[in-house]
Image (cartoon, rainbow, N blue to C red):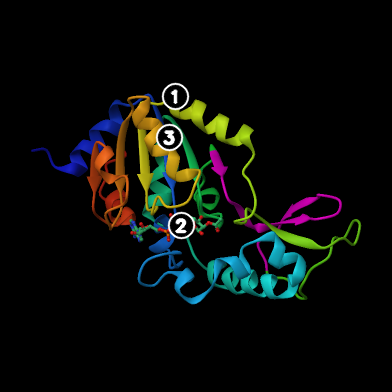
Amino acid sequence: MSNPLDVLQEKIIQSQSIVVLTGAGVSQESGIRTFRGEDGLWNDYRPEELANYESFVKDPATVWEWYEWRKKIIIDSKPNDCHYGLSTIESKKKLSIVSQNVDGLHDEAGSKNLIELHGNIWETLCVQCKDIRKNKSLHETIPPYCSLCNGLLRPNVVWFDEIIPMSTIESISEKINDCDLFLILGTSGLVQPASWFGMHAKQKDKYVIEVNIDITPNNQFYDLHIQSKVGEVFSRLNYDF
Ligand code: OAD
């Protein structure tokens, strides 16, 4: 049987078009906690109290406090070998990333063809005038207000009671229809719609490789599962192709 890393390497070289789905596991080696699992954020915090619009409207300061706490951790984190590996591959062939991560590390590593499915923690969205700004810094006072209209600002992230636009889902489906390799990296596969993309890729007969330190629910449907840390896997690939 071939070594799984050799298969991944070969598939990357052979593919004309690659789509990559990433989750919190991709930033774990950059020092950012995942949501689920032993050290997961959702063990200490309740998503329904912090990650939904209803709670934000009731108590914007508490929701902002939580985001500022996460930003403080993320602000000093650097992309790891997985983020850099993906941007290097993108510089050589067609590759798109669909990331559930809000930390902005794919962008920092130089990835251009990037859909941040759950938004970006460094962006604010004015609830009144809808102005979006990006600023990699912490707020001096919370909740912050819009410099244009004085409306309340919120983090430009997707919350549990919010829906990702259908046009975004359709555009991702089209990318998957057009690819020959679909990589699923460091995601538990428990949150829709991202968890649906792997099955969609299989229905379209794409080669699907998952890299995760754990076994995931849809694991048995994929062509290859590499049970390792993503940063370690990407550090061992050869990028001279
Ligand atoms: P999870 O925390 O649910 O899952 C992280 C996955 O990464 C798990 O399957 C781990 O086994 C795996 N993992 C951890 N470290 C790894 C490493 N170094 N290498 C490889 N795999 C590793 O995170 P997501 O799947 O991204 O949504 O969660 C999806 C969404 O749920 C998040 O975007 C967030 C959360 O609630 C919102 O906030 C809307």
Amino acid under disc 2: Pro
Which residue carries the number 3 mark?
A: 19
Q: Residues within 10 Å of mark 3 (few under 14, many from 20)?
A: many
Q: Position of residue 70 (x, y in %)?
A: 57, 70
Name the foreground residue: 46 vs 122: 46
Name the foreground residue: 171 vs 239: 171
Circles 3 and 2 in contact, beta carbons < 8 Å: no
Which residue carries the number 2 mark?
A: 79
Q: Position of residue 19 (x, y in %)?
A: 43, 34
Mark 1, secondary structure of its residue: helix
Any part of residue 1 in sight = yes
The residue at label 2 has a CB less than 8 Å from ligand 1: no
Q: Position of residue 65 (x, y in %)?
A: 67, 75
- Toward which corner of the image does residue 168 lie, by quadrant? top right
Mark 3, secondary structure of its residue: strand
Which numbered marker is on residue 203?
none
Quarter of the picture holding the N terminus? top left
Name the foreground residue: 220 vs 28: 220
Q: Residue lying farthest left?
A: 1
Q: Quadrant of ligand 1?
A: bottom left
Q: Position of residue 233 (x, y in %)?
A: 27, 51
Which numbered marker is on residue 177?
1
Amino acid under disc 1: Asn
